[in-house]
Amino acid sequence: MALRFVVVLAGLAAACSSAQITVRSTFADGVQPVQSLMVLESMQSGGYRGFNGLMYRGFEKRMRADLAACRVRAELRRGSTNIHTDAGVEAEVRTFAPDAVLKIQALGGDITVTRDQFGTEKKEESDLYFNLELIDLRAKKMTWSVELNLEAESGTGLADGEKFAEAVMAQLRKDGVLTTCDR
C-alpha cells in the first residue's frame, strides 16, 4: 500500500529555532519496523553548503539521542550514500549489518545572504530541500521515502539541525518505521 501526503511540522523543537520543516511528500510501501539502522547522509554533497557544520552537529546529536530512545542500534555516517557502488560504504553496511539504511541527500535549494553597506554579512536565509530513502535490507528494496524542505535563518544552526532531526524522527515514527520509541 502506498501513502502520499503533505504536512507542516512546526513547533517540534523545544530549543529556539527559526527553522520550519515541511514534509513535501512521503511514500511508504511494505514498511517493517527496524531495530537497527545505518544513517548515510550527504547533506553537504558536491560542495553544497546549505546544511552547515553547526546545523549538522545539532542534527547528529538529536538523531543519536532519539534513535537511542527508540532502542534502535544505530550508526551515522557522513559522505557517500551509495551502498551499491562505493566499496567503503558497502563494507561498512555489511559490517554493521543493520535492518535498514536511511539515506539523506541534499537536493539543492537557495541561500540568500544579506550584507550591510560595508559588505558585512548580516543575515543568511536558507531554503533547502532533502530526499530521504529507507532501504530495507531484509526486503531488499526501498520501503519508505520522504522529501523535506528546511527554511532557516543563520544564528540558530544547532537548534535548526536538531529540529530537522526531530522532523525526520517524527515522520519515521508516524509511518511505522520506528515503533519502539519512548517519546
Image: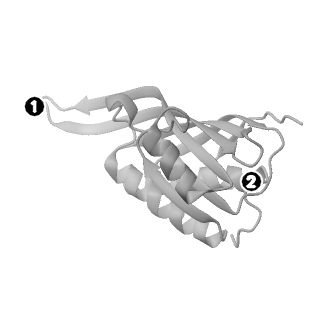
Q: Residue 152 appears at what percent x and percent y? A: 44, 42
Hey, what amino acid is under mark 2? Val
Hey, what amino acid is under mark 1? Phe
| 165 left or right of 6 in image | left
Which image quadrant is residue 45 in?
Answer: top left
Q: Could you give the CA–CA distance between mark 1 and mark 2, rounded to whole angstroms?
A: 50 Å
Give the residue at the far left of this rendering. 118
Q: Give the quarter of the figure containing the C terminus.
A: bottom right
Q: Residue 78 appears at what percent x and percent y? A: 42, 47
Q: Residue at x 74, y 68 (%)?
A: 180
The residue that label 2 is drawn on is 177
- Confirm or deny contact between disc 1 and disc 2 (CB under 8 A): no
Q: Is residue 26 above or below residue 72?
A: above
Let me know if residue 10 appears in the view. Answer: no
| Front position in the image: 116 or 49 | 49
The residue that label 1 is drawn on is 118
Let me know if residue 77 appears in the view. Answer: yes
Q: Residue at x 29, y 31 (%)?
A: 113
User: Which type of secondary structure does the marked residue at label 2 adopt?
Assistant: loop
- Mark 1 vs mark 2: which is more N-terminal? 1
Disc 1 vs disc 2: which is toward the camera? 2
